[in-house]
Amino acid sequence: MEDLINLKINGIDVSVPKGTTVLEAARQANIKIPTLCYLKDINAIGACRICVVEVKGARSLVASCVYPVSEGMEVYTNSAKVLQSRKTTLELILSNHERKCLSCVRSLNCELQALAREYGVDEDTFSGEKTKYDIEDTNPCIVRDNNKCILCRRCVAVCNHNQGVGVIGTNNRGFATDIGCAFNMDLKDAACIGCGQCVVNCPTGALSEKDDTAIVWNAINDPSKHVVVAPAPSVRVQIGECFDMPIGTNTEGKLVAALRRLGFDKVFDVDTAADITIMEEGTEFIDRLKNNKTLPLITSCSPGWIKYCEHYFPEFIPNLSSCKSPQGMYGALMKTYYAEKSGIDPKDIFVVSIMPCTAKKFERGREGYMTDGLADIDAALTVRELSRMIKKAGIDFVGLPDEEFDPIFGIATGAAHIFGVTGGVMEAALRTVVEVLEGKESEDIEYRDVRGFDGIKEASYNVAGTEVKLAVVSGTANAGKLLKMIKEGKADYHFIEVMACPGGCINGGGQPIHDAYTRDTVDIRGLRSEAIYSHDEKSVLRKSHLNPVVKEIYDSYLENPGSHKAHHILHTTYIARGK
Amino acid sequence: MSKETTISKVPFKGTAEEEKKLREVIASWKGKAGCLMPVMQEAQGIYGYLPIEVQKIIADELDIPLEEVYGVSTFYSQFSLNPKGEYKIGVCLGTACYVKGAKEVYDKLCSELNIQSGGVTADGIFSLEATRCIGCCGLAPVMMINDDVYGQLTADKIPAILDSYRRK
């Protein structure tokens, strides 16, 4: 039995387990205390002073995010003293905040702006000296504008603790305090993996994705370009949120319709490339397993993870699958297979991908993501950038009819749909690998042990007489933990799936951003992942090797999975990078 | 737009002996809670400052991000990212000197040497610190270069004084 503590919040009786903070106790009683620096499970440092409350008998207001409950405590979250204190704090924060809200990428989705409105602050109460920073936009994934930073340190916490990267931190002191890299280096020169978790955890516009919408608009408006687009698996269950649809709504049909109305010449599906990834990666796994080559094989779909491995664990580069990610395979096949089939010069094809990810922008520029001298992908947009394009074009997303992908590269299986969530790539691979190794169709294709949001999941399956040991991790800090265990001989696997973001792409750095309160009270990852698994369940085809488009591409073009031609187009190499 | 880094412009001249000493210091502290600060203090004792080369060794050996070490080194004014120059200039910005025009003297030193307080010239000859009262208010405004005291300064006297050291 847990020890329960009884307290009163705004006169309401509340019982919570010992050790609960006042903030969490209030949330359990449906009493909202505003926050800026607090983020459940990520950051609780009592720095911003927005969550202050009055505790009867206490000398001063206390920061509820770090103040534990005690028996008989009486808390007031909305007394006049509390409200005045929060208003003053907001005005102090705003006194050194660049208030270019009208043109800010986070306008109407900014936690500071929302609080300023709720508290009716006067922007000019404290007008004085302001710190001035240059906008840092040299990293291909992330833009930092410290003029809008409120020093909440949420980005620092997630980079350090969840991602195990820690390239950003708090530098200097007092008024000169800023968030940045060691020795004031640019983020592009630091061992940043580009995952964008800092961006989705930023309450203001201080961090944002590198906006590539302009080059996409230019391509669409250029009559000499044949512009193709395709969304990643998780995009279809996220983008509705940008148009106020409920979290976890699968809007695949509307997404296709919106992309057509934006003027793309063809609307394809990265999920088709995900099925091809399974054919290539599955073949690679079987080859390594049967011929005693380097194991464990580690998946290569997540570019944040790949860069993490290159920076922090280069000794595992031989373990990485040589497969390009589904984004890369899609792009490479557009400029080879599709170009040939449609009779269009690959130089005139402009390939756009829609990603839940900021690291895809870095991946796009990798040397190993070129085929015959042409970049596989010409622009990688996040879900947020696409939603801005749709809004700018005046498209009523919610009212759109459902449309279907262009069939040449637009049919996918349930195995591809689940790529968007942690465990999905592993489960998709198993659905194909097991059938190939056992030489017969398998009945049970749901590998539930690899599902769910535990940071490190392990499973073991007997496949054709071999006990195949698997691990699935998400969040690069967990990947680091697992690789250390392998190095120390404490763990041993045949096949590992890694996704850089905690929970996988459904929690990616390029997804729609929700405020801290929503994140604390709604299981956003769970709802998005349910939408993905339900899409899989409803799919007629649920195994990658049954995809007719995939069969056609191999039969008419690539020959076999792992063929010389497939290697030339669909595989890549990696490089060791310093820390 | 790229930022200017705070990596010292003076080339690192650490010796193998100093590095051996640093690694011994780190080994003696490693695993103890709160060991970063004492390690950094001892490292500064060995090298006189904490350049990126030294901070990288500390970060690697303690298995923490370089940024964490750097963050601490910029929070406490006792830590320096630059070596002291051959001639250490201390300009008093205490009250008496300040009202007698120390700010102009300090600004002139910054522009002549192209460094700020805490900085060192790329040739390693001069380092500059803005200090509090050095106890000779009667001579205000005052600066010290190593053990030499200069009083009743004006900005236009600065170039000649610096030149006299450059000629040494």
Image (cartoon, rainbow, N blue to C red):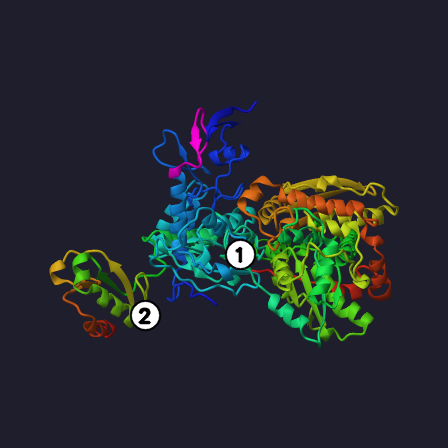
Quarter of image, res A225: bottom right
Q: Is residue A452 left or right of residue A203?
A: right
Disc 1 sits on a residue from what chain?
A
Q: Which residues are magenta?
A: A67-81
Instruction: Count how many numbered circles sit on residues in the image.
Output: 2
Residue sticking out furthest to the left: B138
Residue in view at x 66 percent, y 58 percent: A355
Would you name the residue on which mark 1 appears? Answer: A106
Would you name the residue on which mark 2 appears? Answer: B114
Q: Is residue A191 in sight in this rendering?
A: no
Quarter of image, res B121: bottom left
Quarter of image, res B29: top left
Q: Nearer the viewer, residue A499 or A200?
A: A200
Q: Position of residue B77 (x, y in %)?
A: 32, 53
Q: Is residue A402 left or right of residue A23?
A: right
Q: Nearer the viewer, residue A296 or A63?
A: A63
The label nearer to you, 2 versus 1, is: 1
Residue A72 within the segment the image draws in magenta: yes
Q: Is residue A422 above or below residue B158?
A: above
Mark number displayed over residue A335:
none
